[in-house]
Image (cartoon, rainbow, N blue to C red):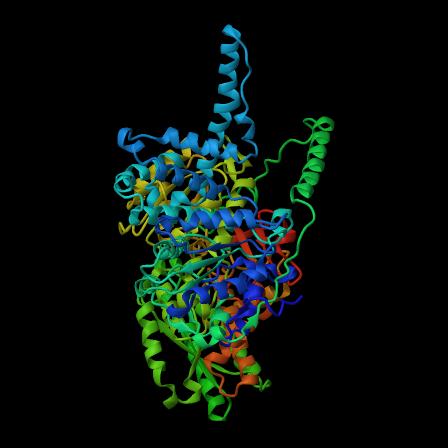
């Protein structure tokens, strides 16, 4: 497939790689469509002001020519009339994407965009309505439902005329027709749409202010903006908010459906929507509208989840706009081609490339047409066939086997509590001794690394960032530092041992750096490391840092530290930090997490809670049902907690309520919508008990830290007001820090499920590699410490063991091609991908800055000090996948 020689060509400022990567980013091979999961950064292609019109036309024509009738795209021209500045480009973007989508491909529906566009259009057209009547909620609902009916679909029949009858019979017939054929369906549609939009994305935005009704919220927004619009229909502040609302709704529609898997709607997302924005010089018609759109995009991307469109703005961006977009550093086209595959974020500046006059005057590069896979039939055809067969099977089963197979009510993982078979007292811990034992092992191995260096062997250094060592028994139970250090020490010991026979291995010195209690000094320690590395030419080769291990917790401080390391180009392998937000800004190019993101964990846990029998039926401790209601407890000031809770709420199909719990009284920056702030464990326990009485089918979803969890459980146990029946708690991997130490030994009313990152050693599905690791771990602990180890089944040590394995393998492969073994070569190796069977299961990085592909996530049920796996999702072995495992793993 070739482009015509006389067709438009892309300006050639070393742009061949950019053009190639553009085609792959927009429409990868069908087998590689997982590449569409990302949200690329904004691209600003700056043309000389003197050649603005011809330059924009040439760039846009070359790129759109490769997409036409194959990929949904929107071309947003600047316009030439004065009213061009009052347009909402977001409305034009959604309309064009909706109309240009190739037949039988997805996304093919834009429900969020259409309803928001209709509401904004009505508000802009009728601002005077709010001057005479402050409450226009009903009018907004009526307008939106009428517009939906006008577009066809299920509501189209409500536009039909009623029966023509006279007298009382006609009156009653018309009343019935109006009520049940027009008003009721439209009211039900509006209620459903409001719920989907508010729960899907708008309810979590600051503009919602706790509201859970779309039309009431937009009525309030309109009341606030109507005065501005009556004075000036093109009021910039009002238009900016409306533009953002419409664009954010559009991004929500472009996010769904998920890519790949089995369902037709997912298998048919084979290309990425593209938006081309013409950006006139400041002061020209249309410049305000274009800049408004780009500001809206930056704000919308802060909360929108991938996948997202590729946005290319072409023209003359003003200095003011560039400042608002984060002052992007100018790039070349080869550098920009690398960024096309990135997963951008709102706080990351766009990619700015300047096209020279010479390139515009030259012949240019042809952009070959893309060729995404196409489909002959609508996705409704296979869906209808599957649905019909399923319905027939269910009807047959219902007729043939009525009452023969009652619904299962067995409790998943049994009926025991955390006190079942538990020791009478919590397992004693030796904070100082155990920490010193782990660091002593690393010191001993560092001495062995020094011997390798003395003999002329290639040696390098890695830095491991850990929190300050715990000082008390309770701090030890709440902290994962000791097991994490043990995993690092074990891999370093193995690496040194195997390096004696394998010359290709690079022994690694481990520099442990404490980053404060709860990593509060992480950012300053990262800056300190970067400053030390400023003049490495004077540093011996074996002291040169080639990478970083950490961090174990997702906090604002560790997020900031990763950005510092990213700006310095330092490869970083994460351990148990799971928040998606850790991979933002400069970290998106140098950070590789080891564990699944919160978004994946929350989706699996939400489906698990809603479909599995985990909540005890009232009066029947041996019978369980799925959770219909979730009581979510977050700490909004904690990045990990707020991220996990928010994603669980958006994924859980039942009802929910939220408590924001922080014993320091810190409830910043923004709690979840409707959250009740609570700084006291006793008061929270009381409120939680009231909620459990009102909703007996509730699961308590815990996303906050282990210390706060222990405080709450102790308060509930002391009060005893709702412990007459078992309480089910589902939590994140933070709870592994304390659950396995026996801290809840006497809580016979607590049923606890939580996530982890490896299977227990005695699980029948545990791999030989996991069993081997646990055997080595047992031998290591026995040789270095005394007492009972509470973390034998904990995943922190295995995760850090595998994370160090990843970094050491990257260093080894870099050394095969680069005698200097510098950080750039390590980054290149990580970018090409690494795979091996690890202690936590199969570890496979495909080159993207993301967790290993389909990384294993385990849900455990705690019984005493013995956890039992009730769910294992992902590629624990190389030949396994979530797709084949079904829900809740696949979804």
**Residue extending farthest top:** 167
Who is closer to the viewer here, 506 or 94? Answer: 94
- Expressed as whole percent of the image width and height from the top left, the position of residue 689 reads 38, 36
| Residue 855 is at least partly visible in this image | no
| Residue 602 is at least partly visible in this image | yes
Who is closer to the viewer here, 68 or 469? Answer: 68
The residue shown at (45%, 66%) is 54
Q: In the displayed structure, does residue 114 sit left or right of residue 528? A: right
- Expressed as whole percent of the image width and height from the top left, the position of residue 323 reads 31, 64
Who is closer to the viewer here, 677 or 254? Answer: 254
- Expressed as whole percent of the image width and height from the top left, the position of residue 710 reads 37, 50
Examine the rendered structure and indicate whether residue 341 appears above or below residue 738: below
Quarter of the image with the N terminus in it: bottom right
Residue 841 image-quadrant placement: bottom right
Examine the rendered structure and indicate whether residue 527 appears above or below residue 226: below
Examine the rendered structure and indicate whether residue 706 appears above or below residue 571: above
Count the marks.
0
Q: In the displayed structure, does residue 793 sit left or right of residue 636? A: right
Examine the rendered structure and indicate whether residue 32 appears above or below residue 622: below
């Amino acid at each position: 497939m070739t482009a015509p020689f006389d067709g438009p060509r892309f300006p050639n400022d070393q742009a061949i790689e950019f053009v190639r990567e553009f085609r792959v980013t927009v429409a990868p091979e069908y087998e590689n469509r997982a590449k569409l999961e990302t949200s690329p950064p904004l691209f600003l292609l700056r043309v000389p002001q003197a050649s603005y019109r011809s330059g924009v036309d040439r760039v846009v024509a070359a790129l759109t020519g490769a997409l036409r009738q194959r990929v949904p795209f929107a071309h947003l021209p600047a316009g030439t009339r004065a009213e061009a500045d009052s347009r909402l480009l977001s409305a034009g973007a959604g309309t064009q994407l909706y109309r240009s989508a190739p037949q039988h491909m997805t996304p093919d529906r834009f429900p969020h965009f259409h309803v928001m566009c209709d509401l904004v259009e009505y508000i802009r057209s009728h601002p005077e309505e709010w001057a005479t009547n402050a409450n226009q909620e009903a009018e907004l609902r009526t307008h939106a439902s009428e517009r939906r009916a006008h577009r066809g679909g299920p509501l189209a029949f409500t536009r039909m005329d009623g029966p023509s009858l006279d007298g009382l019979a006609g009156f009653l017939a018309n009343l019935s027709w109006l009520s049940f054929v027009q008003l009721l369906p439209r009211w039900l549609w509006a209620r459903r749409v409001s719920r989907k939009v508010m729960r899907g994305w708008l309810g979590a935005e600051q503009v919602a202010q706790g509201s859970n009704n779309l039309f009431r919220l937009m009525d309030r927004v309109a009341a606030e903006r109507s005065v501005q619009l009556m004075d000036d229909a093109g009021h910039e502040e009002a238009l900016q908010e409306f533009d953002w609302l419409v664009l954010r709704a559009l991004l929500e529609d472009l996010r769904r459906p998920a890519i790949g898997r089995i369902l037709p709607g997912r298998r048919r997302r084979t290309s990425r929507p593209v938006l081309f924005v013409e950006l006139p010089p400041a002061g020209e018609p249309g410049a305000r509208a274009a800049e408004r759109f780009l500001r809206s995009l930056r704000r919308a991307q802060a909360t929108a989840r991938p996948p997202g469109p590729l946005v290319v703005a072409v023209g003359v961006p003003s200095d003011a706009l560039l400042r608002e977009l984060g002052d992007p550093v100018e790039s070349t086209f080869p550098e920009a081609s690398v960024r096309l595959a990135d997963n951008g974020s709102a706080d990351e500046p766009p990619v700015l490339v300047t096209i020279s006059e010479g390139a515009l005057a030259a012949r240019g590069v042809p952009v070959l047409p893309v060729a995404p896979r196409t489909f002959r039939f609508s996705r409704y055809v296979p869906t209808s066939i599957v649905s019909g067969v399923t319905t027939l099977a269910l009807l047959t089963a219902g007729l043939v086997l009525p009452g023969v197979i009652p619904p299962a009510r067995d409790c998943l993982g049994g009926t025991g509590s955390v006190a079942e078979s538990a020791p009478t007292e919590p397992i004693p811990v030796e904070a100082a001794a155990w920490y010193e034992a782990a660091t002593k092992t690393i010191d001993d191995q560092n001495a062995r690394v020094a011997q390798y260096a003395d003999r002329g062997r290639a040696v390098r250094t890695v830095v491991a960032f850990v929190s300050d060592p715990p000082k008390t028994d309770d701090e030890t139970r709440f902290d994962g530092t000791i097991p994490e250090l043990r995993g690092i020490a074990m891999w370093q010991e193995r690496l040194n041992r195997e390096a004696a026979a394998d010359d290709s291995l690079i022994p690694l010195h481990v520099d442990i750096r404490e980053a404060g209690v709860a990593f509060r000094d992480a950012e300053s320690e990262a800056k300190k490391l970067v400053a030390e590395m400023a003049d490495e030419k004077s540093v011996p080769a074996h002291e040169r840092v080639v990478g970083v291990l950490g961090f174990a917790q997702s906090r604002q401080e560790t997020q900031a530290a990763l950005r510092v390391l990213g700006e310095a180009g330092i490869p970083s392998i994460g351990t148990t930090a799971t928040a998606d937000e850790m991979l933002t800004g400069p970290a998106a190019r140098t950070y590789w997490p080891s564990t699944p993101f919160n978004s994946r964990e929350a989706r699996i846990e939400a489906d698990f809670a809603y479909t599995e029998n985990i909540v005890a039926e009232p009066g029947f401790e041996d019978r369980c049902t799925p959770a219909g209601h979730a009581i979510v407890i977050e700490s909004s000031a904690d990045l990990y907690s707020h991220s996990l809770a928010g994603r669980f709420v958006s994924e859980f199909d039942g009802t929910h309520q939220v408590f924001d719990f922080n014993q320091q009284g810190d409830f910043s920056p923004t709690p979840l919508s409707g959250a009740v702030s609570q700084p006291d464990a006793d008061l929270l326990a009381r409120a939680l008990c009231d909620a459990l009485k009102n909703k007996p089918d509730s699961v308590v979803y815990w996303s906050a830290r282990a210390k706060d969890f222990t405080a709450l459980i102790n308060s509930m146990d002391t009060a005893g007001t709702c412990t007459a029946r078992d309480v089910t708690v589902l939590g994140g991997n933070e709870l592994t820090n304390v659950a396995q130490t026996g801290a809840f030994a006497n809580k016979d009313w607590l049923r606890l499920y939580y996530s982890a990152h490896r299977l227990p050693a005695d699980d029948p599905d545990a791999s030989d590699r996991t069993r081997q690791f646990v055997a080595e771990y047992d031998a290591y602990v026995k040789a270095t410490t005394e007492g009972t180890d509470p973390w034998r089944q904990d995943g922190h040590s295995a995760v850090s063991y595998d994370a160090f394995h990843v970094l050491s393998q990257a260093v080894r492969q870099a050394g095969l091609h680069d005698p200097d073994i510098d950080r750039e070569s390590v980054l290149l190796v990580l970018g090409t991908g690494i795979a091996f069977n690890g202690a936590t299961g199969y570890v496979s990085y495909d080159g993207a800055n993301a967790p290993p592909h389909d990384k294993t996530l385990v849900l455990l049920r705690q019984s005493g000090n013995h956890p039992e796996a009730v769910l294992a999702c992902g590629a624990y072995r190389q030949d396994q996948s979530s797709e084949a495992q079904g829900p809740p793993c696949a979804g």
